[in-house]
Image (cartoon, rainbow, N blue to C red):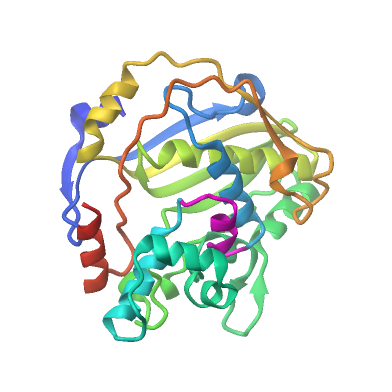
Amino acid sequence: MREILEHGDKQIDEHTEAVTWSLFGRQIRFDLEKDGFPLLTTKKVYWKGVLQELYWFFSGQNNIKYLVDNNVHIWDDYPYKLYLEKIESGANKKLEKEEFIEKISQDEVFAKEHGTLRYIYGELWRAWPTQDGRTIDQLSWALNEVKRDPACHNAVVTSWNPEYLYKMATPEKASRFPICHNMFQFNVKDGRLCLQLYQRSADIFLGVPFNIGSYALLLAVAAKITGYKPGEFVHTFGDVHIYDNHKEAALLQLEREPRPFPKVSISDETKDINSFVPEHATLEGYDPHPAIKGDLTVSGGVVTEAHKKFVKSLN
């Protein structure tokens, strides 16, 4: 974060006009066995959101109703922006965002139609669609592979499918959500399960602390399932950046002294990939500095005129 503030290259998003300060190609590492669970302490990280979102991915879900019903609203903007596109075409009566989310919560039919985000993490981890009509459970395969062969080099899970992304996709299939943390790999070293994430685009102030918690938790759950000790989480970045409107918040965070990491325990009731539920993860000893707020910029993916208007309405 300090390196970005001092040496970052200025960038301007072509669609949202958001300014970021950016570096390319960096890496951070956390040893879960030696150092504890890397939930950052220089500001409070939203643990409930980390836990519920990971379960949402882990269970292969792609409809935000589960998150809304559990009072987790970190994904609300993305289906709402799709809804606004339909309004532009005259297909829907306009609802304000709060009304939209309330209807997702209360109306199963409405939620099924408007709360689904196709081709995102959970669906692609657990049910990657193939051209011959099958689906592939990448996550189950990867976990079984490291159990079967501790020396394997192929336990990779990817969410980056060009068929659905940007202008590589046909208009009707193009994802409106940007896949950012797009590939991870399990590897066993010295009896410990390790995980490396490649994140092509990383918001270091707002998003990355959450991503660290999420993938460290994924590693802890995967270690329980496969019978290994949890080892290193390696977080590799492509473009890693700070939004211009987060600079003051980042400087405040940098003034704070880190505190010891907490611990996470996973219940023995987690026997396999389908038995894990959020109640099986217990966070202990988390003593962070207070939260520091920052506005989310809804950027990336295929951008329409309705999306541009939506972004402007947030600013």
The answer to whether residue 258 is above or below residue 107 is above
Q: Quadrant of residue 267?
A: top right
* Of residues 126 and 77, the one drawn nearer to the viewer in this rendering: 77
Residue 315: x and y, percent? 21, 52
* Of residues 8 and 108, the one drawn nearer to the viewer in this rendering: 108
Residue for point 37% across, 72% down: 82
Residue 278: x and y, percent? 69, 45
Give the side of residue 215 with respect to residue 241, left or right: right
Residue 148 belongs to magenta span: no
* Of residues 91 and 126, the one drawn nearer to the viewer in this rendering: 91
The answer to whether residue 67 is above or below residue 46 is below
* Of residues 203 and 232, the one drawn nearer to the viewer in this rendering: 203
Residue for point 50% across, 30% down: 29
Residue 64 belongs to magenta span: yes
Give the total number of marks visible in the rendering.
Answer: 0
- In this view of the protein, can residue 119 be seen by the observer? no
- In this view of the protein, can residue 243 be seen by the observer? yes
Residue 76: x and y, percent? 43, 58
Residue for point 50% across, 69% down: 115
Q: What span is in magenta? A: 61-73
Give the side of residue 71 with respect to residue 265, left or right: left
Residue 110: x and y, percent? 52, 76
Give the side of residue 85 with respect to residue 54, left or right: left
Q: Main secondary structure of the magenta part?
A: loop
Quarter holding the N terminus is top left
Q: Quadrant of residue 289?
A: top left
The answer to whether residue 188 is above or below residue 155 is above
